[in-house]
Amino acid sequence: MLGFMRKCQVMNQRKAARKRRELYKHGSLGALQGEKKREVIGALQKLYGNRCFWCQAQLHDNPDSAWKQTIDHHIPLSRGGPHEMDNLRLVCIRCQGKKGNKMPLEYIAILHKDLL
């Protein structure tokens, strides 16, 4: 029974990976690189300020900083989120690593646990 469940899990992961590739290829934003990525970051900075969406830390462009800015899918692509502007958030590299592919409410629970 465990082998069957593992096969199902692997199939779901492959299906999610295919969906991510298709979204990047055909999505409204495409792959975020170079000038397009800078435009998206600029738009997110105007929308949310230059602060991490999750921890509100001041973000920097410096690649060596713990508060380096990066883009996060609010609802992860692997969990059905769209690769569109309204699903993107500007976050620090620390929060991005902690959030992974968690849904927003799952990550909020982790943040509150860390604060207690």
Image (cartoon, grey):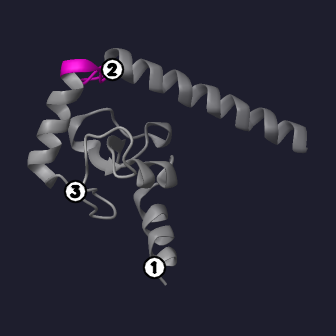
Labels 1 & 3 near each other (Cβ < 8 A) = no
Residue holding disc 3: 51
Q: Which residues are magenta?
A: 27-35
Labels 1 & 2 near each other (Cβ < 8 A) = no
**First along the sequence among labels 2 and 3:** 2
Across and down, in percent, residue 30 comes to 29, 20
In space, the residues marked 1 and 2 are separated at their CA atoms by 35 Å
Left/right of residue 1 with respect to residue 34 in the rendered view = right
Across and down, in percent, residue 104 comes to 40, 58
Quadrant in the rendering for residue 48 = bottom left
Image disc number at residue 31: 2
Left/right of residue 9 with respect to residue 62 in the rendered view = right
State whether residue 15 is above or below residue 6.
Answer: above
**First along the sequence among labels 1 and 2:** 2
State whether residue 35 is above or below residue 88.
Answer: above
Q: Residues within 10 Å of mark 1 (few under 14, many from 20)?
A: few
Q: Looking at numbered disc 2 in the image, what kind of residue is underneath it?
A: Ala
Quadrant in the rendering for residue 27 = top left
Where disc 3 sits, the SS reads: loop
In space, the residues marked 2 and 3 are separated at their CA atoms by 23 Å
Q: Nearer the viewer, mark 2 or mark 3?
A: 3
Residue, far left: 46
Query: Quick one: 19 or 34, which is closer to the camera?
Result: 34
Q: Residues within 10 Å of mark 3 (few under 14, many from 20)?
A: some
**First along the sequence among labels 1 and 3:** 3
Q: Is residue 13 visible?
A: yes
Residue holding disc 1: 115
